[in-house]
Amino acid sequence: MKKIYTFLSVGLVLLLCTACPGPDNHSGDKPDVTIQTYKVSIDSVSTANAPALQSFAHATSGADWLLFAGRTNQDSLIGGLHNLSANYADKSFIPRSYNQNIYAYNLAEDKVSSINYTSFLDDLKVNLCKDPSSEMCQSLSNGDYDFTSIFVNSNPLVTQDDNGYLYVIGGYGPKSFEYFEETPNWKNDTTATDKKKQEYITYNQVARLNIASMIKLAKKQTLSDAEWSDVFRYDTATALVSTGGEVFKMGATFYVAGGHNFTSNSQKYLDAVYPFSVSPSETTISLGVSVSTPISDVSDPTDSVADNNSIFRRRDGPVVPSMYYNETYKKMEQSLTFYGGVFKPGEDLQAWNDALYVHPDWATGNKLYTNDTAYNQNNYNVYACGNFVGFDSDTNLLHTFLLGGIGDGKPSSALSGFSNTGLHITMDVQKQPMQSAIVDTLKNVFGNTSNFYGAESILIKNESSIFSKVPYEVNGKKIMENTEIIDLKTTIGTKSEIVIGHIYGGIESYESNPGTYGKGKSAASNRVWQVTLTKE
């Protein structure tokens, strides 16, 4: 990719892999394999127009990024870390920090366009209700739906598929947007007539959006009737109420991994990975969500007691795509991995430092998961951060890179501070039981800076990245589907380096333990960092 951006003088180069074992060919002999050494450089990109966002929904189409929801900076930087000591009902997550715009951003041009979410919802109703008696119009009007929460929430679960759709699940925000919209001056409002309107909840929504069409709308371009008919699908699902988790698509099935159902006065972790499928209607806005049996270590993850017992009790941590070789079926299969996450049961705010692998198509000991208790993340990168996973087919190693964020490595039971430390983790896809190992702990990944970056940021992969494929059978047809894992061998090829992508947004913290948002504490970030991988 041609480097057309202006870079600040950060340019930190990190040695990532010095010795990686070769694969076993099951014949008793080890093949001769050239061991590759990888280096990563992270360079700050000079941008002026990227919006400041954290915990947001995101997708890509070509060179454009679709960005909405999340929190932003208004009234002296009120994005950033929420106020840990405030009343969670109406003070900790302040409504004026919620982003209300739908953005289309082009990094190469540093160009941003946007519309307010209300414009989209108004136009949606107008265009789907040209015939008020149509099924589409009736479905848009039926039910007690508040579509606002899709576009004004914090920390939803998001993924996009190969067909150009973005899926948005859950998220956290105000219970009533009526109060949110009618009372913009929350700072001075201490006597709301209806306190219930100030409550916060985790949403039960599952939405599908056509990415290309949403980008066109953000650019104020016109959609055809066919595009309007396809732009939006919606459903609700009680089992999928989650914020601070992740969602992955493997074959025709989606998997909601972790997170919790958080309200202003209670919380319940999902304590599971929930598979679900969709059957979108062609004539209504129904997404047709169907939830399957959860993957968990407890018999009933919905029981409140599960929070005290389940090793799936995890939220806001790095959950990444993974793969393994299924010896029974002689093929690669997709999985997902929890690295870190918070919090263990109890009152001392301990993070999880082991690894948890979820492999839906392979049961070991009647379990669809493996708990890697030998792995120790050492209290680094225990919160969600910019990351990517690559697969080296020469060594059969998965390489996971967690870059910055929260988790300072201190062996304390207290809540970890912000840190610019990164981790490089490897896993041999052929070894059983599944095991991860930290290859290197990477200091100062964002260069010589006194601020801290990475928490709740996103690594948006470059268009030139080529993804590993795994076989699937759909309706009797065998297909090869892209994973979210970069094929390192093919992507780098004969080149010495490749731009993997860009870390964007998240929380910028001005202290290691800011405790809140605001001047000198923390804010939502608009920083962009180019991530380059070099093979030696």
Image (tube, rainbow, N blue to C red):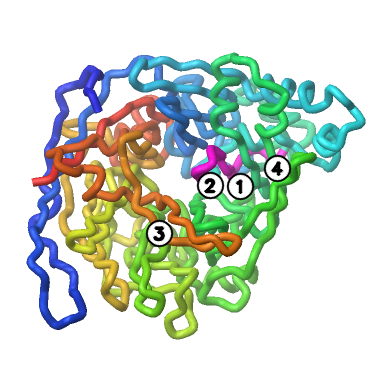
Which label is found at residue 470? 3
Of the image marks 3 and 2, the number of the one nearer the N terminus: 2
Which mark lies nearer to you, 3 or 1? 3
Side of 273 relative to 355 (left or right): right
In the rendered image, residue 466 lying in the magenta stretch gets the answer no
Which mark lies nearer to you, 4 or 1? 4
Mark 4: secondary structure: strand
What residue appears at the point 45 percent right and 71 percent down from the top-left corner? 311
Position of residue 255 relative to residue 180, above or below, is below
Q: Amino acid at mark 4?
A: Tyr
Q: Amino acid at mark 1?
A: Gly
Of the image marks 4 and 1, the number of the one nearer the N terminus: 1
Which label is found at residue 157? 2
Position of residue 314 relative to residue 125, above or below, is below
Res. 407 in view: no
Which label is found at residue 170? 1
Mark 3: secondary structure: strand
The residue segment tinted magenta is 158-175
Instruction: Report the Cα–Cα distance between label 2 and label 4.
Output: 15 Å
Instruction: Report the Cα–Cα distance between label 2 and label 1.
Output: 6 Å
